[in-house]
Image (cartoon, rainbow, N blue to C red):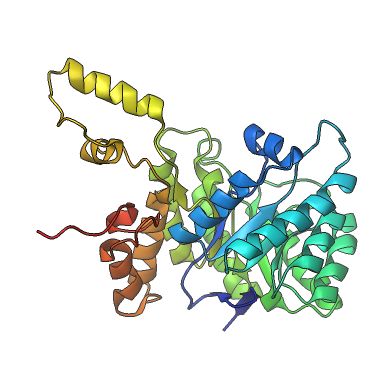
Amino acid sequence: MTRTVVESKTKTAILGFDEPFCVIGERINPTGRKKLAAELEAGDFSTVEKDAVAQVLAGATVLDINAGVVYNSNPNPNETEPPLMKKIVELVQGLVDVPLCIDSSVPGALEAGLEICEGRPLLNSVTGEEERLEQILPLVKKYNVPVVAISNDDTGISEDPDVRFAVAKKIVERAADFGIPAHDIVVDPLVMPVGAMATAGLQVFALVRRLREELGVNTTCGASNISFGLPNRHGINNAFLPMAMGAGMTSAIMNPVALPISQKKIAEKKAEVEAAGIILPEGMEDEAFVQMFGLGSTKPRAGKEMEAIRAANFLTNNDPHGGEWIKFNKAPAAEGEEGRGRGGRSGGRRRRA
């Protein structure tokens, strides 16, 4: 049975067909996050620290580390990314004990991360592009690490699933030429937005089955791509992830954290409640208020996608006797801990009835 082993200094995560689904936390990535990008350029790592801890508390078993900032002061990522990657990897592995996924389009940044990373990280990523194959596969071999293989090549991303399978097969075969076994290749078959391509979900499910049966490889994806541009994205993601797991997908790069509700939304809801003539208890805390009206939480907590994944693990017998499911739903959070409690809600100690 195919198993891809990823390790930190003290903890192991295994991707496999008979293993619990591996959640690779995606939040430490400045792409599309202007505030985080500005902080990193200024040497401020406070958001990285918060995101690392919150994702692990929410259930991430691996953390993706991406240092892809284009500095205003220096737009050359070949110069800026390697030292930044080293700094972030060093910082994060000092905060949490889960394995890491070193993620960059800059080969020098990948090697910088590999040099400083303890254990056996996952490398993200190689594609079927000839230049990329020649740059990345020697790194994979040199450091003896597994790698994410993205199913696009020099012709771009094909909408034809047969072409994407062929690219994946090419990468697996080229990796074998370097002495890299198939169990160290984690294929990303590329999830298309279902809003733009009605068959996107069906394509991925069929591709994952084929990759498992014909190539014997583990798989991953950018889970939120499926719902891009659509309303209620969480609803689509919640359905997609268990279906992908049922087809044989073994991991996903995703956000495991439901972000805190903003003070603006709390104020708007309070004004709405007041206008309706509802009198709230004097001194009611914001957390009690948002929970009462189903708005979420004032603290980061496990997202609904994590609930769907844990339920699917239970239903596929990758959570023996439902231990993790019961813990996720009933275990009280430790004081100050986030991402725990019933349904992933955060909170303090359980009150006595």
Q: Specify the farthest residue to the left.
A: 353
Looking at the image, the residue that sits furthest to the front is 283
At horizontal 73% and vertical 48% (from top left) the residue drawn is: 67
Query: Residue 130: x, y in percent?
Result: 88, 57
232 lies left or right of 291: right
Please say whether residue 216 is visible from this viewpoint.
Answer: no
Q: Position of residue 147 (x, y in %)?
A: 72, 67
Q: Is residue 22 left or right of residue 270?
A: right
Where residue 170 sits, quadrant-wise, is bottom right
Is 342 left, or right, of 88 in this rendering?
A: left
- Residue 123, image quadrant: bottom right
Residue at 68% across, 42% down: 44
The N terminus sits in image quarter: bottom right
Considering depth in this image, is 34 or 318 the residue closer to the camera?
34
Q: Quadrant of the C terminus?
A: bottom left
Question: Residue at the spot x=51%, y=50% of the render?
Answer: 255
- Indicate the position of residue 278 as horizontal and vertical percent values: 13, 23
Q: Residue furthest top?
A: 275
In this rendering, the count of numbered labels is: 0
